[in-house]
Every structure is written in C-alpha cells, then in structure tokens.
Image: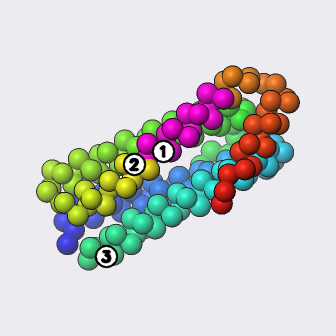
C-alpha cells in the first residue's frame, strides 16, 4: 500500500509523463509544418512512449491500492527556431524528467518503500537511454549545422525510428 506522500508524488509524475507526451506531439506538429517528416515521425514515437510511461505509473498506483488523480496539463510550446533548437529542448526536457524520477526514488528510499524503489528502477534505466539518444542527435545536429542537404539526411535517419 502506498503512503499518501508517495501516492501524491506518483500522481504528479503521471502529469509530467503526459505533459512530455503532449510536448513531443507539439514538436511533431511543428516538424510536419516545417516539412520534416522524419523528425515528425520520431517525435510521434516519443509521444507514444511518454504516454506509455504515464500509464505505467497509472497502473502501478492502482496495483498498490492507491488512487489515480489526473491533473491539468500546461499547453506546450508550438514553435522552435530550428531542428537543432528543438532537439536541444528535448535533451533539456529529458534531463528534467531524470531529475524528477531521481527525486521520486529518493522519496521512496526515505519512506522505505521498497516496491516503489523497485518500480522506479526501470525508469532510471530508461532515462539513461533517453538522455543518450537526445545527446547523440543534438551532437549530430551541431556537426551538420544548417546545411540543407545534411538536415535532409538527418531527417531521413530520424524517419527510420521504429514505432
């Protein structure tokens, strides 16, 4: 059974995960409008993944006898100055989510909630991957700069993402 403190914190994390989904969907819409179909596809995949993360928290709260309480989501940004700017924002956002997950883990540790610590371990590992992928894309975009041909090739590479 979850303590009220853990339940509240996990419900807050659902909001953050669903906001992440919403943010990446907004980025996908921006990419579509900018004729960057590959990046749009990549962002839609991220959006679905983040929604899935929110649902993992939803299921865990329910499985532990808690109550899911959904919260309002802020409107995400809709414009970026470039694909490089957008992916830099992805990296910064993923770093923020990593911090949120780590804070949840610290809270579960403080409360000796071993089940929640175990549950959060998957997310800790996932965030390592998320930051790695975002960093790689940011660094590649720095290498290619604003070269139209290189951006076209990068967009094609992003289109290859499964799901």
Q: For the image shown, how many numbered marks are present on the structure?
A: 3
Between 59 and 34, the one nearer to me in the picture: 59
Residue occupying the point 49% across, 39% down: 131
Q: Which residue is mark 2?
A: 125
Where residue 112 sits in the image (x, y, percent)?
14, 57
Q: Earlier in the sequence, mark 3 or mark 1?
A: 3
Does 54 appear above or below 160?
Answer: below
Give residue 63's mark.
Answer: 3
Neighbourhood count class around disc 2 (C-alpha, 10 Å): few under 14, some 14–19, many 20 upward: few
**Disc 2 + disc 1, Cβ < 8 Å:** yes
- The span shown in magenta is 127-140
Q: Which residue is mark 1?
A: 129
Q: CA distance from mark 2 to mark 3?
A: 22 Å
Residue occupying the point 59% across, 34% down: 136
Between 81 and 90, the one nearer to me in the picture: 90
Residue occupying the point 44% across, 50% down: 126
Q: CA distance from mark 3 to mark 1?
A: 26 Å
Q: Picture quarter containing residue 6? A: bottom left
Q: Which type of secondary structure does the marked residue at label 3 adopt?
A: helix
């Amino acid at each position: 059974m979850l303590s009220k403190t853990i339940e509240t914190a996990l419900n807050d994390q659902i909001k953050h995960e669903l906001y992440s989904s919403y943010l990446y969907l907004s980025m996908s819409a921006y990419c579509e409008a900018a004729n960057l179909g590959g990046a749009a596809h990549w962002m839609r995949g991220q959006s679905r993944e983040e929604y899935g993360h929110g649902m993992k928290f939803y299921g865990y709260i329910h499985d532990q006898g808690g109550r899911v309480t959904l919260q309002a989501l802020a409107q995400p940004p809709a414009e970026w100055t470039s694909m490089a700017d957008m992916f830099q924002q992805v990296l910064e956002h993923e770093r923020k989510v990593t911090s949120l997950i780590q804070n949840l883990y610290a809270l579960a540790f403080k409360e000796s909630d071993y089940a929640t610590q175990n549950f959060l371990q998957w997310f800790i590992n996932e965030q390592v991957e998320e930051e790695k992928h975002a960093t790689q894309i940011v660094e590649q975009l720095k290498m290619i700069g604003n070269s139209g041909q290189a951006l076209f090739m990068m967009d094609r590479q992003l289109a290859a993402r499964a799901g």
